[in-house]
Image (cartoon, rainbow, N blue to C red):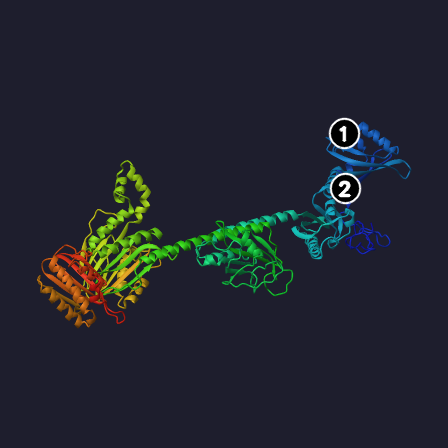
Amino acid sequence: MSSGGAEPAQGDGQGGADCPGDPGGRPRAGELVGPPVWQSSRPGSIYDYIRVASFSLGPDGRIDQWSERAAQMLGIPARYALGKDPVEAFVPGELRDTGRRKVSEILDGREWTGLVPYRREEGGATDGLAEIYVMPSRNEEGERAAVCLVVDVRALRGIETDLAASQAVFGQSPMGFTLFGTDLKLLRVNERFATVFGGPASKYRGCGPHDFLPRSEAERMTAALRRVLDTGEPVAEMQLVGLGSGEGERRRWSVSLYRLHGASGRPIGVAALAADVTGRRRAEREAANARRNLALLNEAGARIGNSLDLETTARTLLDVAVPQFCDLASVDLYQGLLAGDEAPPGMSDGSAELRRVAFASAVSDVRLATAPAAPGDASDPVAVGAVHRYPFNSPCAGALRTGHAQIIPGRESDDGGPEFGAVVQSTLAVPMVARDTVVGLVQFSRTKGSEPFGERDTALAVELAARAAVCIDNARLYRREHERALILQRSLLPPGDPEAAGLDIACRYLPGTTATEVGGDWFDVIELPGHRTALVVGDVMGRGLRAAVAMGELRTAVRTLALLDLEPAEVLSALDEIARGLGGSGDDRPTARSARGRSGSPEGPEQKRSARTADLSEVYLATCVYAVYDPITRRATFANAGHLPPVLVEDGEDALLLDVPPGMPLGVGGEPFEEIEVDLPDGALLALYTDGLVESRDHPLDEGLQAFRRALSDADRPLEDACDHVLSAMNTSHGEDDIALLMARVQGLPKDAVGDWSLAPEARSVARARELARDQLTDWGLQGLVDTTELLVSELVTNALRHGHGEIRLRLLLDRTLVCEVWDADLAQPRRRRARDTDEGGRGLQLVGLLSEGWGSRRTPRGKTVWFELALPDGESPAVDPTEALLSLF
């Protein structure tokens, strides 16, 4: 063909029907424009696929022409074919008769088409099959001849298969399939595509992406088609969104593009395979939401409830929910719950006072207001910490009243600024229910533009609120019980500034953890007769409320035993018996039961009782150090029950651990306690402590004791400051055990504050005693106490002469009170009794009880001491008139 003439414009192809949005009058693809012209076809035509060859037969039935294409297709060169009878040369022997008849028929002027087996060499086997189209012809002399066209059967079968597959794709494929030409116009679409977008498939021939997709999506599709056509790089799973035929729902398609090539490799268009993934995307979105919800619940389980503080738990709930679940959120708790009321929080109608304890927002400058009583109503914002109520007819009050979550729609209007409803699309009001009790309300809100709340969101919100509600209720219950235990323990500890004659006292108590603040460590300062002071520090094994209760029982027992004025070793022995009784029942002794259990003997009733009470027995094991200080002799007597030794710091000396026999812990039993006496010079510092101060996992006990001694050696400062210095120098934040520290600086009573006399066992000693007491009180400037003191001294000395024997000793002690002691050698303790009206005596101790602040007696190594105590005049309250007191006895 001649190469003259211009090539047609790119994209000229097959024609099509009118296309939606296509301007009228546009020529169809493939139609000729203007007069026909001769032109050269580009490589890649249909003949490249079919591969047609030709040869001709002369009037004699022999081959007279053999094309080069025939030589290529059949594999037989022209020199072997020309001039030969094709039947004899190429047809197998068993088919030659049939072949000759067919050649004769053709030379008689008949056309014939059929499959012909052939062989390439004489005598060879059949190795080819050709489809031959034979057309009768005539030569120059008018003789009969034939022109034969040979087609490659394999190419034909491939074309048939491809056509069948193409028809299946375009007619039966459940996926949308389209072919775009090089002008990016549709050449063909399958039925699925036409069904989705409406109309017959022929309607879309010649259309572009803008004819069936939204503008933005069509531009994306066009750009992708052009890129694939230019570069040959395929595009996989490009996501497109549009509207199907007659559907209001937005559909989503996944489109894959690849370039098509002719047999010569020339690009001839782009194929597009589209799958409707709307349902899959919906399922993926639901699965993603489910995964998000599960992750949110996991995070809530890990974070909510780590604190026993109600406000912290509420803030943690909002940290989990915003912005992962909602855009705005708030938590309101009943005011009664926060105030610690015992009654169940709230009212049945949901109108009780609530306090906003937490608020979180992912939207800047937006405060969440109280939900309106009805949709569209205005409401004022509620600040964190504000107390408010919900109106009875409001959705929030309904949620509180019924215990069920409610969805509150936002306002349609944007009037009123950034308040509730102005930017909020919808709100979930979820009551916080724990143990069938509503403790508060949490509101989750989503702003306009976000996805509205659905059923799954409501279920998730209820679950989040329930978890937080249980934690808040647990915190409420814990706080209530903790406050009770704390009140119990603090009521058992001495006051912050205990006073003692001849001692400056400073003390500290640190709980093991700030979460509990309740433990078994205790200390006490007990005033004893004669201005003596008992110092006690103890540690009950265990922690928590039970340890605090055990500590209270032992402390009460210590005070009771101390007031009996027993020796320190006797106090600990009696306390040991009490601890063993508290830890067991009857004759069941923990130590004995444990010993029998370890011996391997068969388990009996006692072992079974031991198993039931083992935990209780362990709680009542305790260590204790007990010291009695006498400010007159400047001497302290110590006894120890398995406790760490006291530390003494004398002026200018290093701290020293006192060598007090350690003894066995209280509750073990079976071993006596020893005591030692230590002289304490004025200015010396005495420290009693528990093991929590010096022992931890970070260092051994010896290192802790060394550090404690160094800290005390450097504590040359006021006692309170010295106490703080010791705690700051030690590791007190380990949280492993409680810490109790009792420090006392020794002062002693000055000599001029003590009056001490010996009296002969004779009647005139009574008058001598009155005279000595009067003179001493006059020297001290206590003339207001002279009459009372003379009367009471006279009574005690008289009793010593009447009921006792041996030398009598009178001692007056002045400190914060006035103490008078009368000593004698008789062991019998005085007993107060009520005298009858006719009795002439027996009213002496009654009179002592009426006129004194307190009185009593105690044993001494050589007898007993009877004492009474008088308060010093304060200038405000009048002193008791001895005469009126004496007359009141009759």
Query: How many numbered marks, from 0 up?
Result: 2
Q: Which residue is mark 1?
A: 92
Type of amino acid under label 1: Pro
- Left or right of residue 531, residue 260 in this image: right
- Nearer to the camera, 353 or 796: 796
- Nearer to the camera, 89 or 565: 565
Name the residue located 91 percent from the left edge and 37 percent from the top edge: 142
Residue 441, position as x, y percentages in the image: 52, 56
**Secondary structure at numbered mark 1:** loop
Q: Quadrant of residue 94?
A: top right
- Nearer to the camera, 817 or 861: 817
Q: Is residue 172 above or below residue 107?
A: below
Do the residues under discs 2 and 1 have CB atoms within 8 angstroms?
no
- Left or right of residue 310, residue 139 in this image: right
Residue 766, position as x, y percentages in the image: 11, 64
Q: Which residue is mark 2?
A: 50
Residue 762, position as x, y percentages in the image: 8, 62
Q: Is residue 22 above or below residue 418?
A: above
Between circles 2 and 1, the one closer to the viewer is 2
Name the residue located 76 percent from the left edge and 33 percent from the top edge: 118
Quadrant location, the C terminus: bottom left
